Amino acid sequence: MGQGERRRLINEGRIAQVNTTTEYFLGDALGSVRQLTDATGEIMYASAYDPYGVTTQAYGASQTSYGFTGEFTDPSGMVYLRARYYMPGDGRFITRDTWMGDYDSPLSLNRWMYVEGNPVNRVDPTGMCWVDILGTNIWIPDQSTVCKYTNYPDKNDFAKLFGITFVNQWDTNDLEAARRAAILVGEKFMSSGVGSDPVQAFRQVYGIHGSQTMLFTWNPSCTMCKPGYCRPDGNANGKDYSIDDPNILIPLLDGTREQCDCLPKGGYTHGERSIEFASLWPKYTSHGTSIQMLRKTNNIIHELGHAFNHRAYQYPENKVASYYEIVNHEPFYLTNRSHGFYVDQYGTMTWVQSTQTSGSEIFADMFIGWVHGKWANDAYGTVRKNFMNINMPSWITNAVGKP
Ligand SMILES: [Zn+2]
């Protein structure tokens, strides 16, 4: 099967299926179909899988042929991964990999093994090369049948691959956040039917062709990076906030107030392919390393949401804004920022990077939820989730088709 053929098959994005009514697929981090909902968000089907993709639970009247990692699954349980079929019960492919493997990576020499034995973090959309959704390595299928091993803690490799140019000095943690954000966004675009790996998908959506590049500029004195007003972030000491007016006193959680430190924070997106960062919010948190990394990553995903909005002719922000007008007096829809976003153990602030009610800021925060597939587990979250799942496919088409 040629590369073109593979791409066509992958391009049949699993966003919805039409039986008698349209049902929407809801996936997990690997893209596995966990639930089918109708247009109102009601669950029609739900399923659970063990790490290797064996269905452990399924209930609901509705049925789908798309299951583990979002791929077509035949009645015998075999998962169609284009070049090959994968058998979840055995944790291996039914035929040998056409790729011979790489002697520098011994596990790749086992040509029947599925994702080199790490099904929790990896998917294999081609049946030839695995993709690590969060780790440090990735196998990229090239134009033939060889998987190219790419290890990108190295800033230059990673940047070259995605077509991102890092301007000025980026520290290691911030670079790592950028790498994670680009992979997650690319992976999500790929699972929405663009390209056949996260890098291709990222480049196609953002129009990074030939010598074009996306600028990530580190600029601590970026004046545009100041948010509209100060805010506490709700952590234990209330010391993390975004900065604006030195005269504004921030209410802390203990009831006292404190002056803003007035440094610009966060980023500012200038257009489709240029983002300036003053810091990755929040820089001064007392939280642990992993939540900091997630917040930094989400800060970059938020800015990539703005860039996507520009790329899609501002349709996303306009749609959010017009949605607001229609339901102005119903406070639980898109514009009420206190509802509908995912809540982790530290509150919503990992998932809400701005408190402004503009269509542009609301969309950029919902872009974070869409990329991770995480929303508040309530009616408000369902409204946001459905809004994104229903509208993103056409905006992605707009972006990919843009010259
Ligand atoms: Zn923003």
Image: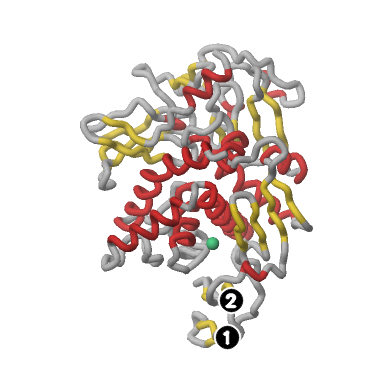
For residue 199, above or below residue 7:
below
Residue 273 horizontal/vertical position (percent) = 63, 49
What's the residue at 39%, 57% (across, down)? Answer: 320
Residue 90 visible at all: no
Name the amino acid type tagged 1: Glu
- Asked whether, in this view, residue 130 is left or right of residue 358, the answer is right
CA neighbours of label 2 inside 10 A, class few (<14), some (14 to 19), many (20+): many
Residue 39 horizontal/vertical position (percent) = 27, 44
- Find the distance from the CA under tag 1 to the CA under tag 2: 9 Å
What's the residue at 43%, 32% (across, down)? Answer: 13
Residue 46 horizontal/vertical position (percent) = 31, 37
The circle on residue 351 is none
The circle on residue 239 is 2
Q: State the residue in front, 309 or 350.
A: 309
Q: How is the image coloured?
A: secondary structure
CA neighbours of label 1 inside 10 A, class few (<14), some (14 to 19), many (20+): some
Q: Secondary structure at mark 2?
A: loop
Name the amino acid type tagged 2: Lys
For residue 74, above or below residue 199:
above
- Asked whether, in this view, residue 271 is left or right of residue 379, the answer is right
The image quarter containing residue 393 is top left
The circle on residue 258 is 1
